[in-house]
Image (spheres, grey):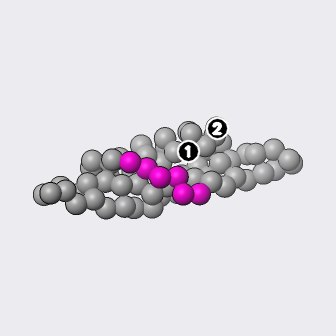
Amino acid sequence: MSIAKVTEVIASSTIGIEDAVRQGVARASKTLDQVQSVWVSDITCDVQDGDVVEWRVRLKITFVLTD
């Protein structure tokens, strides 16, 4: 039997949404073992002078607890 847990992470990128997700998953994987999936629950961005300067994503990351 496996037990899974979900944690929430907020990550950002000046490149784009996909890069923000990748950075969030990479950082979470440094301290969480067996990351299984990620759900992007929210996307926001900062705008300056009519241009997007930073993307932010709220991630719900699922990982399996080990013995």
* Residue 27 seen by the camera: no
Whether residue 53 appears in magenta in the rendering, the answer is: no
Instruction: Provide the major secondary structure of the magenta segment.
Output: strand
Element at label 1: helix
| Residue reaching furthest to the right | 49
**As rendered, which of 65 and 51 lies closer to the eye?**
65
| Disc 2 + disc 1, Cβ < 8 Å | yes
Location of mark 1 (residue): 20
Neighbor class of circle 1 (other Cα within 10 Å; few <14, some 14-19, many 20+) is: many
Compared to 42, does 20 lie above or below?
above
| Residue reaching furthest to the front | 1
At x 27%, y 47%, the residue is: 34
Whether residue 41 appears in magenta in the rendering, the answer is: yes
Q: Which of marks 2 and 1 is nearer the N terminus?
A: 2
**As rendered, which of 60 and 26 lies closer to the eye?**
60
- How far apart, in angstroms, are the residues tagged by discs 2 and 1? 8 Å
Location of mark 2 (residue): 15
At x 86%, y 47%, the residue is: 50
Which amino acid, mark 2? Ile
Which amino acid, mark 1? Ala
Residue 20: percent from the left, percent from the top? 56, 44
Please report the bounds of the magenta region as a residue range. Answer: 37-42
